[in-house]
Amino acid sequence: MKHGKKYAEAAKLVDRTVSYEPNEAIALVKKTAIAKFDETIEVHIRTGCDGRHAEQQIRGAVVLPNGTGKTVRVLVFAKGDKVNEAEAAGADYVGGEELIPKIQNDGWLDFDVVVATPDMMGVVGRLGKVLGPKGLMPNPKAGTVTMDVTKAVNDIKAGKIEYRLDKTNIVHVPVGKASFTEEALQENFNALMDAIIKAKPSAVKGQYLRSITLSSTMGPGVKVNTLKF
């Protein structure tokens, strides 16, 4: 993959043979975020899990203390009083059965997170083929299947993010924007790492955190010292 001149300049600042302390890695990633837009800072955690086994899966959610820097659009599937509750909490879209054809047939996907009350999961389940591959299916572990829609919407708007293993046993999570201060990114990073460490499946043998890399949307990866964790 050929990279541009800017990327090459930024990459020179990073020593690929070094695993940096988290605060140094964050400072470097901010320095190498040189795109014209406010780049997202992401953490990529390679784990020792084998996601093919259910007991080694990692999935959950954590509220980042300083948010993600992104405006998140929330769709809530609810009925009865819960419709008003979701609207009052600031959900962007609230509905039920009537949204199925809009999503299924019209390809409407103008939302980032889907929350559902348990009594609506039968309806939402019919959208599995559309929402599943996009990682949008509500899930009790992530707190998106719940009767407490107020808390769910508030947490998401405040910067709650989901983490889960991908097919290669890596977790990819945003922890903020390049415009954030180093302190804000460090706090978000710490909150995420605490959650990932607590989520360690007991069935995992050997090293749990194989590697941690920080990067901006367009910038080079910066390795983080895993011994800290």
Image (cartoon, grey):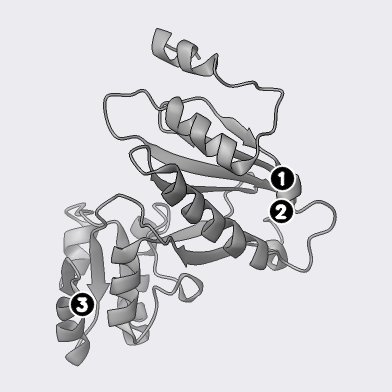
As measured in the structure, the alpha-carbon distance from the residue carrying label 1 to the one carrying label 3 is 39 Å
Name the residue type under label 1.
Thr
Q: Quadrant of residue 135?
A: bottom left
Q: In this rendered view, identify the residue nearer to me: 101 or 121.
A: 121
Pair 2/3: label in front = 2
Is residue 110 in view? Answer: yes
Q: Horizontal and vertical percent for residue 183?
A: 45, 48
Which residue: 51% across, 58% down? 163
Q: Horizontal and vertical percent for residue 151?
A: 33, 79
Name the residue type under label 3.
Ala
List the residue tagged with mark 3.
89
As measured in the structure, the alpha-carbon distance from the residue carrying label 2 to the one carrying label 1 is 6 Å
Mark 3 secondary-structure assignment: helix
Q: Residues within 10 Å of mark 3 (few under 14, many from 20)?
A: some
Q: Horizontal and vertical percent for residue 123?
A: 30, 77
Name the residue type under label 2.
Phe
Relative height, residue 211 to residue 74 (above, below): above
Q: Residues within 10 Å of mark 2 (few under 14, many from 20)?
A: few
Q: Does label 2 or label 3 sit earlier along the sequence? A: 3
As measured in the structure, the alpha-carbon distance from the residue carrying label 2 to the one carrying label 3 is 36 Å
Badge number at residue 226: 1
Which residue: 37% across, 72% down? 125
Q: Horizontal and vertical percent for residue 13?
A: 54, 18
- Tally of numbered tags: 3
Badge number at residue 51: none
Relative height, residue 170 to residue 83 (above, below): above
Horizontal side, residue 154 vs residue 209: left or right: left
Q: In this rendered view, identify the residue nearer to me: 191 or 138.
A: 191
Q: Does label 1 or label 3 sit earlier along the sequence? A: 3
List the residue tagged with mark 2.
229
